[in-house]
Each structure stands twice: as C-alpha cells, then as structure tokens.
Image (cartoon, rainbow, N blue to C red):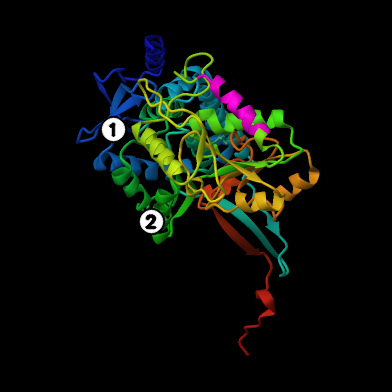
Amino acid sequence: MSDILHDIKTFFADLGLHLELGIKKSNLGACTGEWIAPEEERKLVSINPSSGEPIASIIQADDAAYEKVMTAAAAAFSTWRMVPAPQRGEIVRELGNELRVFKEPLGRLVSLEMGKIHSEGLGEVQEMIDMCDFAVGLSRQLYGPTMMSERSRHRMYEQWHPLGVVGVVTAFNFPVAVWAWNAALAAVCGDTTVWKPSSDTPLTAVAVQHICNRVMKRHDLTGVFNLVIGPGRTVGERMINDPRVPLVSFTGSTAMGRHVAEATSRRFGRSILELGGNNAIIVTADADLDLAVRAILFAAVGTAGQRCTSLRRLFLHESIADQVVGRLLKAYPSITIGDPLEKGVLMGPLVNQDAVDAYVAALEAIRAQGGEILYGGGRIQRPGFFVEPTIVRAPPELAMAREETFAPILYVFEYTSLDEAIAMHNSVDQGLSSAIFTESLRAAERFLSHEGSDCGIANVNIGTSGAEIGGAFGGEKETGGGREAGSDAWKAYMRRQTCTINWGGELPLAQGVKFELE
Ligand code: UN1
C-alpha cells in the first residue's frame, strides 16, 4: 500500500498540489482557477475503502466560498460564451491531452479513493478522454436547422445559445467520468460549470480541478471549470435553489433526484437527472451461454455492483435456468476479492460503512421475504468495506428486487414465455439499462421494440453496464429521464432560439391572418 501512496503523492506533486497524504495538512475544497480558503475550517477526510484508513483531508467550502465560486462562474460565463465554439473546443482538446498524460496516476487515485479495480479506474479516465474528444468534434457541429417559411421573402432557422452556469453534482461511483460527460459538453456549448463531487471522493475531484487549472492557466482563463466540495445539505441545497444556475445535472438516488427536480422546476430551472437503476438481463433458451455468463459476471460483480448500470435482476428461461445458475455458482468463487490495485483482483470494496450496512440490511430483508441465498450473503471480515458477491434465487414477488441496493446482489428469476419475461422486466419503477441474450432475431427485435424494454438503454448480447460515450446515456421512469454524454445530449446545455427574418417589403401574417387598417 505504501508504494501506491507514494505514487499518488508524486502524482499530486506533479500537479503542483499542496495536498498532504495522511491527515497532516489540509487542502482546499473550492476553486475557480484560484483556490479559495473558507472562513470556517470544516475538514473532510477521504477514506480508503480497502483499508478503512484515512488518505488525506480537504477543507470543505463554506457559504462564503460557495458564493465566491458562483460569482466567478457567472462572471466567466459572460466572456467564455463569446469565445467561438471551435476555439472552446481547442481548449477542451488540451484538457483531453492533459488527461492522457495523467491517465495512469489519476486512474490509480480513482481506485484508491473509490475502490474500483485498476483497469476500471483507467477506463474511467479513458471515458473522460473520450468525452473531451467527442466534445471537440461537437464544437464545430452545434447545428440548428433551417425551415421553409410559409411567407414570401422570409427565412426561418433555429440556433443554439450558451445557457449559463451548469451545476454538476456527481456520485462516488464514477467520481470523474460523469463530471467529464457534463463539463466537456458544457464547455464547448459556452457554459461554465460548478462541480459538487461526492463527499466520498474529494481527492479525485481536487486532482481533476488541478488538471483543469493547468490548461486554463495557459489561456489566462479562470471560472470556466469550478469546484465546490461540501455537504449536499449546504452546498448542494444552495446550488439547486440558486437562480444563477439554469441547469443542474444530478447523479444520485431517486429520492434526492426528486428533491432536485422539485427545487429546480419551482424556479423554472432545468435538471438532468441520472437516478436509480434496476437493470436486468433476459436470457432466452437459445442464447449463447458462454457470452451470457461472462456478461452477467462483469455486470453483476464488476465495480462491486456499484454502477447505476449494474445488473441486479436476471431472467432465465426455465429450460436453461439450472445450467446458467450452475455456471455462475462455479464462477463466483473464482472471483478474487481484495485491494483493487492488486493484480488479478476483480472485485474491490464497497465505498463506505453505510454501503455495507445497506447490503447487510438488504440481505436480512431478502431472507425474510423468502429469497434463497445461493451464494455469498455476508460481509467479509477484513479491514475495509468488503462484502461477498451474492446470488439470490428470487420468488417472482420478492419486494427487495424492486429496490436498488448499491451492492453486488443478483436476483435470479425463471420465466416460461418471453411475454412474461418482458412484463416482469418492465414491472419495476426504474428504467435505466437492460439487455437480452438471444440468438433469435424475433426475440431481439421484440426486446428493442415498443413492446419490449422500457429502459433508456437496451442491449442485445451485451451486458447492462459499460456503455460507450457516443450514445446518449440515461433512463426512463424513476431513473429521471435525463440524457448525458453522446448523441445530441449537448442540447440540454444550450438554449434554443427560433428566428424568423422578413427580408421583403411586405408584412404578411402567418396562418393567412389579415390585420389591416381600412
Ligand atoms: C453510472 O454508473 O453512474 O455504462 C455511470 C456504464 C458507464 C457509466 C456508468 N459507462 O456502466
């Protein structure tokens, strides 16, 4: 472990960071390009979930620091929006290049602080890089259409303007990639961002802010990428109620998302919500079971079940159910659980003690409701927040399977007909990601049709997690309806304007209306 701490320390030093490892010295949690010292020193200690030990601490933003950050972000918007979009794209290109330079240490820091395995930590930084590249291309493609006017010598078109300050509230499980989904798009769209990261992962946020600062300093810019680390009930609450923030992008629980939606819409602000998922895979009788089992393992156990897209429910056709369960029961014991930075480890810890408690409580409820634990079901006695990946044979009515527990618990159901499987699949409140494993064209197309999956993401012969950035990411129902990352998700970060120009000498009215003095 000390080697890793040494590497991370070197990484911080390379960034010119004052952060001390251990809790000797404190760093600041608010930044506009310049770091802001709060009046009141409230320390936040970042804990390594693999050991339960502190890594380092930062000083959280207080009300005054929040105010300074928001004022700077609002002021920077008025100049940043005047920079031509392709030039904004060039700066985002530099950010992507800087992330390439720091991919390895930043990926390690993600693993150290959040607990995902090294390959996934690197993958997360790659997701940021991909997002920057995507945004660079987009900076020349913020297109609005032209319409044919019904009036002679009139021209109509739509254009997109920058929106303002975007509040970005991210969760611990993707501590940096989800920031990039929002910040890279917002930046090319001409917006400034204020990032409130999860209090479980402040160090990765501080590191990313330093990387942004390096790039922005070259261009003599401050206030475009901003950071405020602080509790949701103070910093988050201020942000969602702040009229200077026309858009809040929030990733987190459905309960909090409902609150964010209410607060933002009360003031006619907008929100992008990426909330709970309860993702499922249907495996048909003719499916390629080798593919299916590998995909199930990654989706259910990967990231210790702490992705919004993690697989929670598995619907197996009755003819192959025993075979698939048998294969899973053979594969689960060979998953190496441990320090996420160690070679060969496939599953790290949960993020904190609360997550372990939620896992334990979920298992009690599952047992009480008649779920049969086929594998796992307990916490692992070692330092840190480790639990066993768990397989539950679920009766169709199992209430716990309707809730999202952010842990590696997989509920297995059997079905007879595809109709029945799809009905069960769609019967939950959440609607993020979904998949079918099948060799049948009919079953695949049915799953992707209006009569199929009701989720924002629907895959064939691919698991529920691990989406590429090129598509729009988000879900329906209680997942919140927001879309981030690729495709035309950028439109949420801009305001649309419809323009009609009369270049003739007459004033014809639309719809043939006449309004003339006699
Ligand atoms: C999340 O869990 O909040 O599709 C995001 C995936 C990742 C993103 C997950 N690309 O699993």
Identified by mark 2, the residue type is: Ala
Describe residue 377's horizontal placement relative to residue 228 as left or right: right
Identified by mark 1, the residue type is: Ile
> Taking the image as four quarters, which one is ligand 1 found in?
top right
Q: CA distance from mark 2 to mark 1?
A: 27 Å
Q: Position of residue 423 (x, y in %)?
A: 64, 54
Question: In what element is the residue under mark 1?
Answer: loop
Nearest to the observer: residue 179 or residue 352: 352
Whether residue 306 is visible: yes
Describe residue 85's horizontal placement relative to residue 321 as left or right: left
Magenta span covers which residues?
323-336
Residue 226, placed above or below residue 162: above
Nearest to the observer: residue 490 or residue 447: 447
| Residue 331 lies in the magenta-colored region | yes
The residue carrying mark 1 is 36
Describe residue 138's horizontal placement relative to residue 81 as left or right: right
For the residues carrying marks 2 and 1, which lies nearer the camera in this image? Answer: 2
